[in-house]
Image: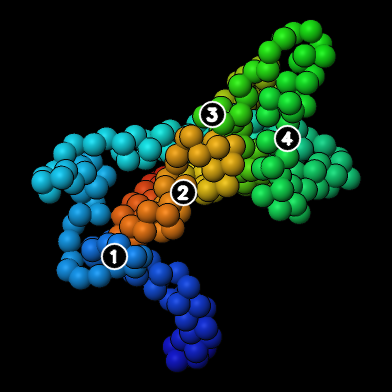
Amino acid sequence: MGPNRTWLLIAPAMLVIGIFMVLPLFLAVAYSFMTANPYGGVTAPATFDAYLQFLYQRDFDDSLVFSPSYALIILRSIYLAIATTVICLVLGLPVAWYIVCQTPERRRILLFAVTLPFWINTLIRTYCWILILRDEGLANGALRHAGIITDPLPLLYNDGSILLGLVYTFLPFMVLPIYSTLERIDPRLIEAAHDLYASRAAVFRRIVWPLARPGALAGATLVFAPALGSFLAPDLLGGGKKLLIGSLIQMQFTSSRNWPFGAALSTVVTVVVLTVFVIRSRRVQEERR
């Protein structure tokens, strides 16, 4: 196959990527260096004010005043994304290993159960958690019925509820890559380790985890990237009290009408996600070597 024919085959894919991925990214970067129009949109001249707004605010005399509010929101978003990734890894690895240890028929049933949430709209699933966690919800009702509490616990509209929603949403993204890696493990390696009197902990540390690590890295990337910019779970389960990057970006493009700052936030999220992908790619290449 000649080079001209090869380019002809990949041209449609490159065109779709260019229009729907690269072009919006360049527009976001360009908007982030423009001046905000009070009525929405952007206008000239070019400025760095959108990036200065991460740490500074304009005072009445147009001087810069240090304000860590947005930096704290970004740090909280990164913290919750990392916590979501770690919890999904802790929960997803044993789940994936349990599925691998089952018969083929039971594997299909369990995989169906793992992927079942994908069949239901995320908005509906998030609202279900509101019904469970609210003061008159199922969780508080069950605790009161058991006599454990008398007043409802504040289970909703805090970092804990947001973290719960993120873990519930993205846990399958961790289970499936780890399962696909563990499925290829030769069971004779496990049998040989037990024949050599290796403990369960030693088998996991020396055989299972090294072989599962590529799937865990892939799952961590698939969980961290969308969790960092997630909008539904923080907005609904946080009740607007705990802003994260996704909610902040949406606010800048709607009610605040500060498109350059919203574009700057989007650019920062994209840079962080691309950095994670680059680090993961290097780790994979080092392990292959």
Q: CA distance from mark 4 to mark 2?
A: 23 Å
Which sits earlier in the primary sequence, circle 1 or circle 3? 1
Judge the density around disc 1: few (<14), some (14-19), many (≥20) Cα neighbours within 10 Å.
Answer: some
Q: Is residue 180 visible?
A: no
- Between the C-alphas of marks 2 and 1, the distance is 22 Å
Q: Is residue 219 left or right of residue 76?
A: right
- Kindly report the distance in space between the C-alpha atoms of the residues bearing marks 3 and 2: 16 Å
Tell me the crowding category of disc 4: few under 14, some 14 to 19, or many 20 or more residues within 10 angstroms, Cα based.
Answer: some
Report which residue position mark 3 lands on.
158
Q: Residues within 10 Å of mark 2 (few under 14, many from 20)?
A: many
> Tag 4's secondary structure?
helix
- Label 4 amino acid? Leu
Q: Quick one: label 2 or label 1, which is nearer the N terminus?
A: 1
Q: Which residue is mark 2?
A: 246
Residue 12: horizontal and vertical position, in percent?
52, 83
Is residue 178 toward the left or the right of residue 29 in the image? right
Question: Residue 101 appears at what percent x and percent y?
Answer: 78, 35
199 or 234: nearer the viewer: 234
In this view, 242 is above or below 275 = above
CA neighbours of label 3 inside 10 A, class few (<14), some (14 to 19), many (20+): some
- Please name which of the two marks, 1 or 4, marks the residue nearer to the observer: 1
Front residue (pair 134, 99)? 134
The CA distance from mark 1 to mark 4 is 40 Å
Of the numbered discs in the image, which one, if any, rests on residue 37? 1
Measure the C-alpha gap from mark 1 to mark 3: 34 Å
Choose mark 1 or mark 3, whichever is in front.
1
Q: Are marks 3 and 2 in contact (CB under 8 Å)?
A: no
Please name whichever residue, 15 or 253, is drawn nearer the observer in this view of the structure: 253
Badge 1 element: loop
Q: In this figure, which residue is indicated by the disc labeled 4? A: 131
